[in-house]
Image: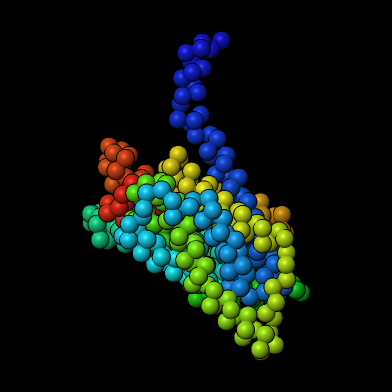
């Protein structure tokens, strides 16, 4: 029988305290990935313009962020914070455009995993600030990431092209095989660049925000700025599409729009923020990839996608190893000072403050 002292010690253990945050992180990422699959199906079935759809989702998201954070209230923000946040809005807008285009062309599985390609900035930090031994480790991690992306581009995560699948692809499947083979590594470049831009905007947000409350206020400015940058492009799609006779209408789908706004943009920001503050888990980390991988498996099976579980696991393992090596820091420094370095983030860590990166 446990004594009251033992019970209090168990409740005070880090694992017990972090369990609710781990559950929140898992549920939040599950709904975010669910919104990605619903967005992919909506875009494919309706043929709606990607930029116009994202703009219609960012408008209410920016309004909600402004209402929640009220960046005009409280301590005044300096120009050294506002100007980089506005520039970060441009990077965020480019990220959304490339990511949406990549989602439509490559599918949700490849688009989600390509977001982790932002870990290449960890290689850059190793080249600029790391020691020679760590540089080679980061280069090895970069090679492993490229190998994983190559496997994904060749369709290893699909049952029709995976070398681990014994399923015979005939009839309609032959067209799917041709489509997958035509993708190639060049077809993966769009979501890969989107992943790099996503990591870059997190680095900038981390650089300009010293406190958690300031970080949230600046994020509202960034999303609003991204919405303004997307406005002319969305109107261009609308005008050009209507004049050329192409599909320019945006059919309404409650779940596609609401899930993207609520879970894909708003909730996931706060969920990842909690994970970084409480769990020291940043986006470009193997632990985050593991959570996303479990959610992807559930969604692939639920949506009855062309999915190969063994091939997907191999791609995730190689990608996770590459991320771990590419974002690795000096172990002695991490063990001696957790406050000065985030244990799972190697992106330009020596040059920035300890506030976590801002993912969306």
Q: Is residue 331 found left or right of 149 in the rendered image? A: left
Q: Nearer the viewer, residue 26 or 300?
A: 26
Q: x, y percentage for residue 173?
A: 72, 71
Q: x, y percentage for residue 72?
A: 44, 55
Q: x, y percentage for residue 14?
A: 45, 30
Q: Nearer the viewer, residue 255 or 11?
A: 255
Q: Nearer the viewer, residue 1 or 67?
A: 67
Total marks placed: 0
Residue occupying the point 67% across, 70% down: 43
In the depicted structure, whether residue 28 falls above or below residue 148: above
In the depicted structure, whether residue 179 falls above or below residue 125: below
Q: Nearer the viewer, residue 6 or 168?
A: 6
Q: Is residue 255 found left or right of 309 in the rendered image? A: right
Specify whether residue 102 is in view.
no
Residue occupying the point 56% across, 10% down: 1
Residue occupying the point 62% across, 59% down: 260
Q: Residue furthest front?
A: 73
Q: Residue furthest right?
A: 171
How was this image coloured? rainbow
In the depicted structure, whether residue 182 falls above or below residue 4: below
Q: Is residue 289 found left or right of 344 in the rendered image? A: right
Q: x, y percentage for residue 90?
A: 44, 69
Q: Residue furthest bottom?
A: 244
Residue 133, quarter of the rendered image: bottom left
Specify whether residue 80 is in view.
yes
Residue occupying the point 70% across, 67% down: 42
């Amino acid at each position: 029988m446990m004594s009251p002292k033992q019970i209090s010690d168990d409740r005070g253990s880090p694992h017990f305290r972090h369990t609710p945050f781990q559950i929140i992180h898992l549920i939040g990422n599950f709904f975010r990935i669910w919104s990605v699959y619903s967005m992919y199906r909506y875009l494919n079935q309706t043929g709606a313009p990607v930029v116009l759809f994202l703009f219609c989702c960012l408008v209410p998201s920016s309004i909600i962020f402004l209402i929640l954070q009220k960046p005009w209230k409280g301590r005044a923000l300096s120009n050294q914070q506002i100007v980089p946040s506005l520039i970060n809005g441009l990077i965020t807008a480019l990220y959304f455009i490339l990511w949406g285009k990549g989602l439509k062309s490559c599918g949700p599985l490849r688009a989600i995993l390509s977001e982790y390609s932002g870990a290449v900035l960890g290689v850059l930090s190793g080249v600029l600030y790391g020691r020679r031994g760590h540089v080679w480790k980061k280069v090895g991690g970069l090679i492993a990431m490229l190998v994983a992306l190559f496997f994904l581009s060749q369709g290893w995560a699909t049952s029709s092209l995976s070398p681990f699948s014994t399923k015979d692809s005939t009839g309609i499947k032959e067209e799917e095989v041709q489509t997958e083979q035509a993708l190639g590594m060049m077809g993966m470049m769009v979501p890969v660049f989107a992943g790099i831009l996503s990591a870059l905007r997190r680095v900038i947000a981390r650089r300009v925000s010293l406190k958690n409350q300031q970080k949230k206020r600046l994020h509202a400015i960034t999303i609003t700025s991204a919405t303004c940058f997307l406005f002319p492009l969305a109107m261009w799609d609308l005008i050009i599409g209507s004049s050329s006779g192409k599909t320019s209408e945006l059919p309404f789908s409650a779940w596609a729009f609401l899930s993207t706004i609520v879970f894909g943009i708003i909730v996931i920001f706060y969920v990842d923020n909690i994970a970084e503050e409480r769990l020291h888990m940043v986006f470009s980390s193997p632990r985050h990839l593991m959570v996303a991988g479990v959610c992807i498996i559930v969604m692939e099976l639920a949506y009855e996608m062309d999915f190969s579980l063994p091939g997907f696991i191999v791609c995730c393992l190689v990608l996770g190893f590459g991320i771990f090596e590419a974002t690795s820091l000096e172990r002695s420094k991490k063990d001696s000072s957790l406050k000065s370095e985030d244990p799972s983030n190697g992106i330009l860590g020596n040059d920035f403050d300890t506030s976590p990166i801002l993912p969306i």
